[in-house]
Image: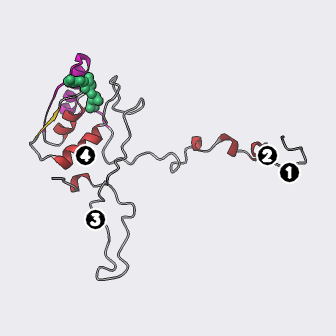
Amino acid sequence: MFHLDPVRIPQKYPGKKYFKGPKAGQYSCNPLGKNPGDLWVIPNVKSNHVEKTEHPCQFPVELIERLVLSLTNEGDWVLDPFLGTGTTVIAAIRHGRRGAGAETVPKYVELARQRIQQEMQGTLRTRPMDRPVYDPVESGNSLTIAPWEKTPQQATLFEENPPDGRKAAP
Ligand SMILES: C[S@@+](CC[C@H](N)C(=O)[O-])C[C@H]1O[C@@H](n2cnc3c(N)ncnc32)[C@H](O)[C@@H]1O
């Protein structure tokens, strides 16, 4: 069992159409999105992630949401015997499933309890499942350009025949 439709992701070319054959002119992709495939690109929970707690290896909620939606039905039980901060139970509750878990570290049990309560009250902040992954190059982030490529003056330091007549560095 794998429910594909709830976990489809946006097409790269949603406007693409068949250009020949009996379906010519019709859209060639599924309007619900494409299959997420074998490689799931989801940002991990590091320091500036909205979900970050003091747990050192917390999973992003959107990762478990995708598993819950594709592999379970509404009303099912979802068990995570290594619960950590409660991510699995949060994803389960969010999508109409029931959640259970075990955790040996009291500090994490308390964190999980708080986060699950926040989820039930609708106040838990998480990264949305459908938010595209930030691409610094596409976004024009200036840090993606190497400093020595920014000014032509700096580039001449590496040239064999500098245009202003200076001797090239040995
Ligand atoms: C990879 S972390 C899970 C993180 C969790 N998915 C989250 O998003 O917060 C594994 C957790 O399993 C707990 N753990 C380790 N051995 C355990 C055991 N025998 N029974 C229950 N929990 C255990 C650890 O304390 C740790 O919090």
Q: How much space separates mark 4 and mark 3, taking CA atoms?
A: 19 Å
**What residue is shown with label 4?**
66
In this view, the residue farthest toward the front is: 170
**What residue is shown with label 2?**
156
Q: Compare marks 1 and 3 and give the one earlier in the sequence.
A: 3
Q: Compare marks 1 and 2 and give the one earlier in the sequence.
A: 2
Q: Compare marks 3 and 2 and give the one earlier in the sequence.
A: 3
Q: Compare marks 4 and 1 and give the one earlier in the sequence.
A: 4
Query: Tag 3: residue type?
Result: Asn
Query: Tag 1: residue type?
Result: Pro
- Ligand 1, seen in the image, is in the quarter at top left
* Residue depicted at 26% across the width and 17% down the height: 107
Q: Residues within 10 Å of mark 2 (few under 14, many from 20)?
A: some
The quadrant in which the C terminus is found is top right
Q: Position of residue 54 (x, y in %)?
A: 34, 22
- The color scheme shown is secondary structure
Residue 100 located left or right of residue 13: left
Q: How much space separates mark 3 and mark 2, taking CA atoms?
A: 52 Å
Q: Is residue 113 magenta?
A: yes
Q: How much space separates mark 4 and mark 1, taking CA atoms?
A: 57 Å
* Residue depicted at 79% across the width and 48% down the height: 159
- Whether the residues at callouts 1 and 2 have beta carbons within 8 Å, the answer is yes
Residue 85 located left or right of residue 151: left
Q: Which residues are magenta?
A: 98-126
Residue 163, numbered label = 1
Above or below residue 78? Residue 82 is above
Tell me: is circle 4 under 8 Å from ligand 1: no
Q: How much space separates mark 2 and mark 4, taking CA atoms?
A: 51 Å
Residue 40 visible, this angle: yes
Element class at badge 1: loop
Element class at badge 3: loop
Depth check, mark 3 against mark 2: the one in front is 2
